[in-house]
Image: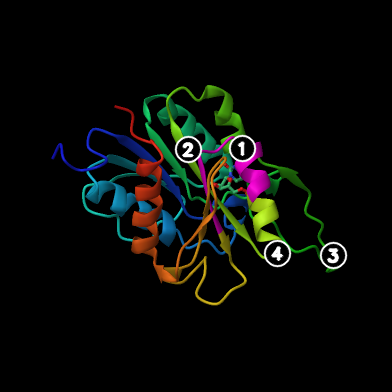
């Protein structure tokens, strides 16, 4: 429908917590459920977009009309997003990307040593996907997320700038009903040179619609 606000727009959404393998049966991950990203994908589709969801979560129902690609690690996510980015109009990075991965992933299951000695895991940083994409931006409108447990606004403002985002969705995950596993969220939307917009505690689909409507109002869709 040409009247829908995201008609003819290619929207790429990432969702869920990446998994960094230790061995064939174990991984390091985080508490992200993927629900916020799935809600953004659903809202974008309802607003008329052509939506691809890159998901590190496999247990959520895929919204009707949304194409899904499943990934595991931060490296997989980087590869997939990099492939899709040039033909994307609006990128929403809702995935909780692991900041570190094991230096080595064992090819066989790691066994307990006979002497029950402590085990030390050596971790190395994963690539920052948004920072990698920033220099490749042409017309894309890019939205990032920041989940913080302290100094929310200072950290969020820094991320908006350092990741060269058009919009950053900040949430205080230490507050009840906010962020990771629930069905509600309360966020603050930060944009360059704009006063922050604080939402009420809303369902994740309502938060998703607010994010996308704010992006459209800010000029995310080019004429
Ligand atoms: O720096 P931090 O992980 O808090 O930033 C969160 C935002 O950056 C999210 O939008 C997340 O998807 C993105 N991110 C990323 N690559 C990483 C880590 C986070 O693109 N390695």
Q: Closer to the observer: label 1 or label 3?
A: 1
In depth, the one of 98 and 161 nearer the eye is 161
- Side of 10 relative to 160 (left or right): left
Mark 3 = which residue?
118
The picture places residue 18, in percent across and down from the top left corner, at: 54, 51
- Side of 145 relative to 157 (left or right): left
Distance from label 1 to label 4 (Cα)? 19 Å
In the figure, 136 relative to 174: above or below? above
Q: In the rendered structure, which disc, 4 or 2, sits on the residue that comes first in sequence?
A: 2
CB under 8 Å between discs 4 and 2 = no
Q: Which residues are magenta?
A: 157-170
Identify the residue at the far bottom of this view.
176
Does any atom of ligand 1 lie closer than 8 Å to the CB of label 2?
no
Mark 4 = which residue?
150
Distance from label 2 to label 3 (Cα)? 43 Å
Helix, strand or loop for disc 1: loop
Q: In the rendered structure, which disc, 1 or 4, sits on the residue that comes first in sequence?
A: 4
For the N terminus, the image quarter is top left
């Amino acid at each position: 429908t040409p009247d829908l606000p995201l008609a003819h727009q290619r929207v790429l959404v990432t969702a869920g917590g990446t998994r960094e393998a230790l061995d064939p049966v174990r991984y390091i991950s985080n508490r992200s459920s993927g629900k916020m990203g799935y809600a953004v994908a659903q809202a974008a589709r309802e607003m008329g977009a052509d939506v691809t969801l890159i998901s590190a979560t496999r247990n959520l129902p895929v919204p009707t009309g949304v194409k899904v690609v499943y990934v595991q690690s931060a490296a997989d996510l980087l590869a997939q997003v990099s492939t899709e980015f040039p033909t994307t109009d609006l990128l929403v990075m809702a995935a909780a990307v692991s900041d570190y991965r094991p230096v080595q992933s064992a090819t066989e299951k790691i066994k307990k040593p006979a002497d029950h000695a402590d085990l030390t895991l050596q971790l190395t940083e994963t690539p920052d996907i948004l920072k990698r994409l920033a220099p490749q931006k042409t017309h894309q409108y890019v939205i990032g997320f920041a989940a913080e447990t302290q100094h929310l606004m200072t950290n969020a403002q820094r991320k908006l700038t350092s990741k060269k985002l058009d919009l950053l969705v900040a949430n205080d995950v230490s507050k009840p009903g906010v962020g990771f596993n629930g069905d509600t969220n309360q966020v603050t939307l930060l944009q360059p040179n704009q006063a922050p917009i604080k939402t009420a505690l809303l369902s994740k689909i309502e938060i998703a619609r607010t994010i996308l409507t704010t992006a459209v109002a800010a000029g995310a869709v080019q004429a």
